[in-house]
Amino acid sequence: MTEPSGLRVRIHAADPVRRRGLAAMLEAAGHAVTDDTPDVELCDLAQPLPRESEAAVVALAASVPAGAAPAGLLPPDASAAQLDAALRAVAAGLLVRAAGMPETRGFAPIEDAPLLTPREREILGLIGEGLSNKAMARRLGISVHTIKFHVEALFAKLDATSRAEAVTKGLRGGIIEL
């Protein structure tokens, strides 16, 4: 079995010693440090996060930097294995927080969120993709009547009067992501 390929990572670190240490950790994990077209940006806590980034950002900080929402947030003393896993995860489009890190937008617990069944969540996501009842029924292999039943249940649980309102409430409540 072959080892997964490494990522191109741009490091933002003011301290040259810290930068060399991070670069060594990345290279040991099979990643390449680059200054152009990275897959992921790695920002040390002393550096401000890039305003506009070509790639997902992983921040090494004890708390979320003001006005920022990095895709990954790890403590400054994260191990090489944690760093490698976080970089690969954000490059794949996931959001990452180390255990015990502060909650941020997208990670906060949902308070008073309606209890939806897994099927209702799935259907709400499909509504968000713009699928019609007929298209959802085909994709899920169930009847249009069953889809209508689930949509009505969603509207009641979310207190929504339209598909757009249901999706908006689902997005704002963190029930679904598009």
Image (spheres, rainbow, N blue to C red):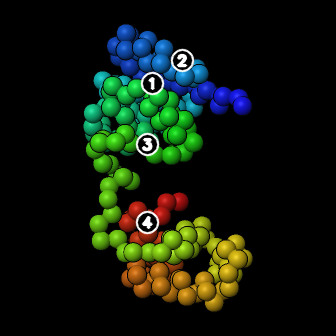
Q: Are marks 3 and 2 in contact (CB under 8 Å)?
A: no
* Residue denoted by label 1: 80
Name which residue type carries label 1: Ala
Mark 4: amino acid: Ile
- Residue to which mark 2 is pinned: 28
* Residue 39 badge: none
Whether residue 71 appears in this view of the structure is: yes
Report, in whole angstroms, how far the alpha carbon at label 1 lies from the one at label 2.
Answer: 9 Å
For the residues marked 2 and 4, what is the alpha-carbon distance in whole angstroms?
Answer: 38 Å
Cβ atoms under marks 3 and 4 closer than 8 Å: no
Could you give the CA–CA distance between mark 3 and mark 2, rounded to whole angstroms?
A: 21 Å
**Where is residue 111 shown, x and y percent of the image?**
29, 66
| Mark 1 touches mark 2? (CB < 8 Å) | yes
In the rendered structure, are the residues bearing label 2 and label 4 in contact, judged by CB atoms less than 8 Å apart?
no
Earlier along the polypeptide chain: callout 1 or callout 3? 1
Q: Earlier in the sequence, mark 2 or mark 4?
A: 2
The three-letter code of the residue at mark 2 reads Ala
User: Separation of disc 3 and disc 4 at Cα?
Assistant: 18 Å
Looking at the rendered structure, the secondary structure element under dot 1 is helix
Q: Which residue is mark 3?
A: 96
User: Residue 7, located in which quarter of the rendered image?
Assistant: top right
Q: Earlier in the sequence, mark 4 or mark 1?
A: 1
Q: Point out the tag, 3 or 2, that comes first from the N-terminus.
A: 2
Q: Residue furthest front?
A: 1
For the residues carrying marks 4 and 1, which lies nearer the camera in this image? Answer: 1
Q: Earlier in the sequence, mark 1 or mark 2?
A: 2
Task: Kindly identify which numbered label has been placed on residue 175.
Answer: 4
Secondary structure type for disc 3: strand
Badge 1 density bin: few <14, some 14–19, many ≥20, Cα 10 Å: some
The crowding category of the residue bearing disc 4, from other C-alpha atoms within 10 Å (few below 14, some 14 to 19, many at least 20), is some
User: Where does the image place residue 169, in percent across and percent down from the top left?
Assistant: 41, 71
